């Protein structure tokens, strides 16, 4: 293991709240920086045209659909590394890190190739038309090339996080965000000697920033001075570890796909209400990502805390970590949502000056923001299940939120009838309840509240206590008496 043990947080002993804070705040900062990354892209693209904003808005869920595959790598690595570290099996944790890196390289290259090959079909399926299609194609062609770098960074971050080090990845994210933000106006608007590339320029800046973060992360793991080490001999495929990573990770990847396909579906629904609604949706979702940023980070910290404590065989402490993290998350998001609901025009006006998208965005925020705390609570509890290695439960919760609540309610509340693609059958929804695009906003809120109630109840059943690693049984002492 590396020599910088001070970077690691041991969640198995001591007061929970201070250690949870120490583990979580770098993740919160890192995710906020990542959100700023996305908002900066939207800010500068907004200086190009409304069509450019709509294009990047449509591509956000599509790009995330591919990136979400890396969520399986992240979930499995955190669960295995944290439980091995909690059990004192640090050499086993190092092997997991190497096999994670191997999967990241192969998976990133394969998905980048698939995305580029089917890019035209994907954009058509998303509902991109006219100039929005042109701008979206320019963006996504470069964005897919960045996928291998994204996968490698996920491998790096999850490896250190499982060992209890969240600060190193935060600093690396900060540097990459600075690179992206500085490069954005040069590539998007053509500042200085650079050509004006519009939406393609936003993707180029992202490609460079992610490439730096990925390569620097691999260097850090190879050096081994930041809490856990990657050794080249361990990169030889280990069928048993790879199988375990896949078995634990694939439900988390399906979880990510379920979220992404639902996001694609919801974006497609919104696109049918015009460019102004699509632009408002894109900006609203990015503002809403503040809730995902905070709750996702605290959920990741919870995952590490639960994993370490299950490795140390202290499940009651793992439960305490989860409930404290959930309560803090909901309080924070409730406060942030209050500000957004009080000043929605200010929040929307940062990104666009067109009154029509601003007006629709204000409606979005007033309906959805009051439920941000429930979005956050679900994400923290899902993090606890992932830390226990119960990624299947987290997957089911995502399906419930998106495909049992969000999508059906969006169809029922926003449309009077829906035609099933490729079949041509038209199905009546609820003609008496035709809220237009606001029905889609209400579907988000209903999904958040309903899935939170189910998630909290399921965690209280304590079906997650055994973890996923094998513990060495203690040798009983000889009884000489």
Image (spheres, rainbow, N blue to C red):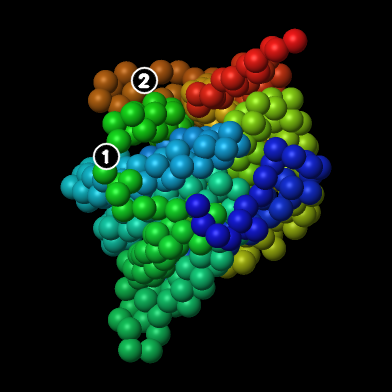
Label 1: element kind: loop
| Residue tagged 2 | 426
2 or 1: mark nearer the eye? 1
Identify the residue at horizontal 35%, vertical 42% (top origin): 99
* Measured Cα–Cα span from mark 2 to mark 1: 50 Å
Identify the residue at horizontal 52%, vertical 37% (top origin): 89
**Residue 458 location, quadrant:** top right
**Residue 131 location, quadrant:** bottom left
Identify the residue at horizontal 33%, vertical 46% (top origin): 234
Query: Which one is in front, 455 or 80?
Result: 80
Query: Which one is in front, 439 or 458?
Result: 458
The image's mark for residue 91 is none
Return the residue found at the far front.
Answer: 480
Label 2: element kind: strand
| Residue tagged 1 | 237
Seen in the picture, residue 241 relative to 354 is either above or below; the reply is above
Observer able to see residue 279: yes
**Quadrant of the snapshot with the C terminus:** top right
Seen in the picture, residue 242 relative to 3 is either above or below; the reply is above
Return the residue found at the far left.
Answer: 117
């Amino acid at each position: 293991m590396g020599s910088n043990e001070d970077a690691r947080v041991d969640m198995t002993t001591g007061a929970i709240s201070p250690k949870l804070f120490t583990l979580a705040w770098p993740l919160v900062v890192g995710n906020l920086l990542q959100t700023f990354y996305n908002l900066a892209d939207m800010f500068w693209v907004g200086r190009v045209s409304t069509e450019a904003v709509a294009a990047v808005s449509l591509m956000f869920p599509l790009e995330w659909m591919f990136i979400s595959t890396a969520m399986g790598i992240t979930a499995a690595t955190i669960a295995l590394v944290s439980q091995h570290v909690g059990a004192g099996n640090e050499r086993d944790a190092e092997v997991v890190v190497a096999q994670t890196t191997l999967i990241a390289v192969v998976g990133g290259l394969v998905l980048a190739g698939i995305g580029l090959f089917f890019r035209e079909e994907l954009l058509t399926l998303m509902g991109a038309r006219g100039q929005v299609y042109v701008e979206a194609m320019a963006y996504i062609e470069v964005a897919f090339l960045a996928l291998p770098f994204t996968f490698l960074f996920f491998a790096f971050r999850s490896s250190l996080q499982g060992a209890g080090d969240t600060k190193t990845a935060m600093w690396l994210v900060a540097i990459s965000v600075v690179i992206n933000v500085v490069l954005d106006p040069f590539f998007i608007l053509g500042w200085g000697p650079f050509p004006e590339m519009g939406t393609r320029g936003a993707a180029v800046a992202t490609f460079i920033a992610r490439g730096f973060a990925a390569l620097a992360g691999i260097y850090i793991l190879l050096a081994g001075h930041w809490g856990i080490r990657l050794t080249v001999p361990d990169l030889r495929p280990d069928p048993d570890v790879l199988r375990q990573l896949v078995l634990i990770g694939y439900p988390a990847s399906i979880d990510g796909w379920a979220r992404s396909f639902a996001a694609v579906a919801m974006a497609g629904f919104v696109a049918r209400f015009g460019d102004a609604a699509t632009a408002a949706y894109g900006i609203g979702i990015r503002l809403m990502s503040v809730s995902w940023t905070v709750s996702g980070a605290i959920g990741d910290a919870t995952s590490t805390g639960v994993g370490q404590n299950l490795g140390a065989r202290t499940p009651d402490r793992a439960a305490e970590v989860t409930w404290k993290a959930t309560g803090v998350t909901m309080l924070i998001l409730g406060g942030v949502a209050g500000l957004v609901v009080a000043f929605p025009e200010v929040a929307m006006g940062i990104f666009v000056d067109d009154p029509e998208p601003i007006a629709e965005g204000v409606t979005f925020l007033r309906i959805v923001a009051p439920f941000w705390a429930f979005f956050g609570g679900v994400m923290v509890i899902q993090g606890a299940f992932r830390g226990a290695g119960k990624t299947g439960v987290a997957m089911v919760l995502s399906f419930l939120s998106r495909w049992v609540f969000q999508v059906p309610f969006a169809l029922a509340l926003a449309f009077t009838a829906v035609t099933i693609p490729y079949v041509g059958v038209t199905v009546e929804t609820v003609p008496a309840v035709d809220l237009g695009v606001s029905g889609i906003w209400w579907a988000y809120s209903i999904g958040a509240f309903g899935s939170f109630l189910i998630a909290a109840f399921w965690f209280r059943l304590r079906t997650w206590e055994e973890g996923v690693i094998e513990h060495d049984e203690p040798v009983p002492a000889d009884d000489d008496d």
